[in-house]
Image: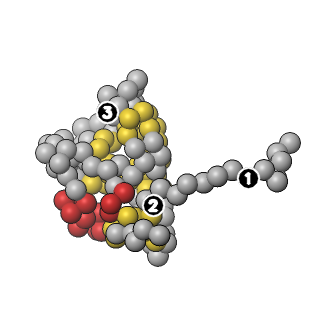
Amino acid sequence: MTDLNTQTSFTPDNLFAGHEIPVLVKGVTLEAGQGELKRGTVLGKVTATGKYKAVNSANEDGSEVADCILADDVDTTAGDVTAVAYKTGHFNRKALVFGGDDTADTHEQTLRMLGILLSENVKP
């Protein structure tokens, strides 16, 4: 039986910048061999396989185009992993993770067309 009087702590990670845009999710398969991907990693979809990896504008396999944002930390070292990704929402641009030398500026226009708005959170 769960003790309803027991409280757990929650430390916000500042990934979300607001709730004006509905947060919708989808399941994705992360390509093996990327190591640990952090919550907030912007993902691109490999055209040939349909699998996702960290977006990197230097890639030429489809994953150079931003598609969604990883919802949880995931380790892909041992193989492909099924994960949850955000396909819409309002996110803190400074909390996002990109592959290569990419930044939020690199992918902001594409993300906006997908329904992902980026802003900069003010720290409390």
Query: Which quadrant holds the N terminus?
Result: top right
Q: Which residue is mark 3?
A: 34
Identity of the residue furthest to the front in this view: 124
Q: Residue at x 19, y 44 (%)?
A: 100
Please determine whether, in this image, residue 38 is positioned above or below residue 106. above
Q: Secondary structure at mark 2?
A: loop
Identity of the residue furthest to the bottom in this view: 20
Sort mark 1 into few (<14), some (14-19) or many (20+) by Cα contacts within 10 Å. Answer: few
The image shows residue 46 at horizontal and vertical percentages of 26, 41
Identity of the residue furthest to the right in this view: 1
Q: Secondary structure at mark 1?
A: loop
Residue 110 in sight in this render: no
Q: Residue at x 33, y 60 (%)?
A: 94
- Give the left or right position of residue 122, taking residue 50 as reference: right
- Give the left or right position of residue 88, taking residue 44 as reference: right
Picture disc at residue 14? 2
Task: State which mark lies toward you, 1 or 3.
Answer: 1
Picture disc at residue 7? 1
The image shows residue 49 at horizontal and vertical percentages of 29, 36
Q: Tell me which corner region of the image, top left, top right, bottom left or bottom right, holds residue 58.
A: top left
Q: Amino acid at mark 2?
A: Asn
